[in-house]
Image (tube, helix red, strand yellow):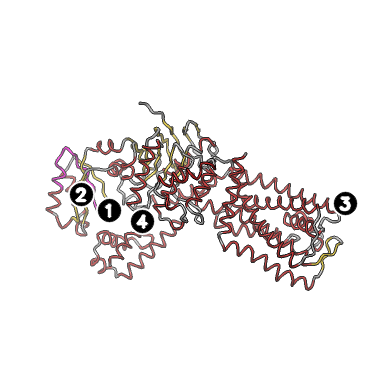
Amino acid sequence: MRLAISVVKALAMRITRLYFSSWKGLVISIVSPLCLLFFLGPTLGVNVQTVNVFGQPVGYLAFFLPGVMTMALFYGTMFTAGNSVVADRVTGFSETIRTSPNPGIVIVSGHVLGSVLIGGVQSILFLMIGLVYSPAFSFSLLSILAIAFVLLGAMFFGVLGVFLGSRVSFSNFSLVFTIASIPLVYASTIFVPAADFPAGLQPIVLLNPVSAMADLLRVALLGVSSWGAVPGGLASAVAIDGLVFAVYFSVATFLALYLFDKFPRVIERQGKRDAEKKDAVMASPIFEMVANAIGKEKLQELLPLVQQGRVDELLKHFPKEKVEKLLARVKVALGKHES
Amino acid sequence: MFMPDIISVASVSKRFGDRVVLKALSLGLERGSCVGVLGINGAGKTTLLKILLNLESFDGGKFMIAGHEFAAGRRGGKLPPQIACQIGYVAQQVAFDEEMTAWENLKFYGRLFHVDSGVLNERIGSVLSLVGLLQAGDVHITQLSGGMKRRLAIARALIPEPRILLLDEPTSNLDPISRHQIWDLIDVLKAERGISVLLSTNDMAEAQRLCDVVHLLKDGVCIVNGNPGNLVSSLGARIVEMHYTRAGMDHVNEIKEKIDKIAQGTLSKVDGFMHVRVYAAASSNADEALLKYAREKAGWFESVSVREPTLEDVFLKVAGVSFDRDGTMTYRSVVAMFERFLGGI
């Protein structure tokens, strides 16, 4: 157990270190919510000064800040966890990790913890800005429980990221992530309360894990909840959101571990594709391979002269510019072959 | 003295779809020895190493590694922890965290492989010293050369103090000095640490230099195996390399007929695009006769040389292929050739 914790910690620290050493990822992940907080929030707040969360009026900016924190946690954890899995696979680092004496759950936990730390740091940063910007927050004992569930939610998003990262190729990851994240963000209570959605959509919005996270943060910071109408008040609301996360987290963890276990098969499929590419190379003599790029006749004339270094002879048939053009075409063919 | 095999592969087969990658391959690795798996790209070398690491499943046969047996049909997954710590793996594609220093990379790896934190720093210093990179410990990976990265990869694999090293083309694309540094390092690991090495390579000189036993693979099948020195001796031939000129290219068929006539029944040959490699029986004087012929037709030959055979000659003869006819000369080598040419204009 001690060893497992040590490995999880090492993996998590590696991911956070890699993330924070890349200024691009850091800037993008901070700038986007900051724009929302400083541009969209006040702009909407001009027209919607207060929102009604199940009968309780809340200032829009105060309402919006937990939404922005949710976005930071959601994107920070899910994208970072997924991206770290995909990046390790592309660089070959995943082989190093997979040959280590650690079960899949330890490796997945390391990825998830690292991503939660990253999302958590960003989220706390926004909270600090928000406290200066709109200090009308109230904390209670229930806030602690709500924040504990927020962490569970963040872990869920991390596991979801690992799930996506295990299934999707590097080239498709951003696209799939965007497709997966857009409905989660926009059919949530990040921007508006659940009660403002059409009645038919409200159950979807309320059961959306992103809404659950925003709701828990609002309970923790504002003492209001989208579930405020349920018997038992805020405590029941926190319990419902916690239950939502517990269900999602369990399913996602099962899927992520199952797929991580299947990971060798993903590698095998990659191996099969590589083998097919190699087949294409191996089956073709050198003439046929390069002839596709520059033409068989030209190649047959050119290669012997190049091999023998017979510059004068070659230049009689092929001026330097022409040889350079041929080389460029071979390089293009090389790129296609290796892609 | 009989030394039990630390790796024993028995009739292992593997296919990707319709393509057979390994066909009933068997080999053994004795403790403290180096066994080479040789072949051109796509021969199944890397696949074998990945099967041994449980990174890929296999379809037939079984293998034993560090006392643990694995049979076909296993779903892949991970090696048991006690086995994983006994195997050091250096992949063909060396992957490090570029934002970290060499030392930090090794430290992470040590923790990943459960090396006690009390001895980890000392262990890192020791392996860095062994590979000649102690001074580079604080250097970021981006500042290391290709050869240094390969040595660092070997150092990393040594952190858990493995008994077995699986090396996948450890010197490919390296300059001659770096290659020799790595070869010397592997010698030291065998001799001083008693590490058993399974080496995948397509570099025949490397295999001849390092391996106690080699297995030459072609299309997933072992076509010949044995001690490199014995395999070379068993050829019983001297090699005559004859490179054609442009004029000679116009008379290739005539040249080949003449070669066959000169040395009928005493030699074999492997045709290349620009040259012919003749295996002249050592007991005959066919090599002298060929040299005489080349002098007579001086305008047809760029160069002619007689030399002792190498492992590469064994491979070419046994595989029945010529390197520049079977696709080993890839786009990349063509590009390199063109670039050299353009640089010379």
Chain letter for mark 1: B
Q: Amino acid at mark 2?
A: Lys
Q: Secondary structure at mark 3?
A: loop
Which residue is tagged 1?
B273
**Residue located at (37% from left, 57% from top):** B332
Mark 3–mark 1 distance (CA, rounded to whole Å): 86 Å
**Which corner quadrant of the image does residue A211 belong to?**
bottom right
Circles 3 and 1 on the same subunit? no
Q: Nearer the viewer, mark 3 or mark 2?
A: 3
Mark 4–mark 2 distance (CA, rounded to whole Å): 24 Å
Compared across the picture, whether A215 is left or right of B187 comes to: right
Which residue is tagged 2?
B256
**B323 and A148: which is toward the camera:** A148
Q: Residues within 10 Å of mark 3 (few under 14, many from 20)?
A: few
Q: CB under 8 Å between callouts 4 and 1?
A: no
Q: Residues within 10 Å of mark 2 (few under 14, many from 20)?
A: some
Q: Secondary structure at mark 1?
A: loop
Estimate the x, y position of residue B223 in percent, counting from the top left.
Answer: 35, 38
Estimate the x, y position of residue A80 in percent, counting from the top left.
Answer: 61, 55
Chain letter for mark 2: B
Residue B126 lies in magenta, yes or no? no
Q: Nearer the viewer, mark 1 or mark 2?
A: 1
Q: Secondary structure at mark 4?
A: helix
Residues shaded magenta: B273-290
Chain letter for mark 3: A
Q: Which mark is residue A288?
A: 4
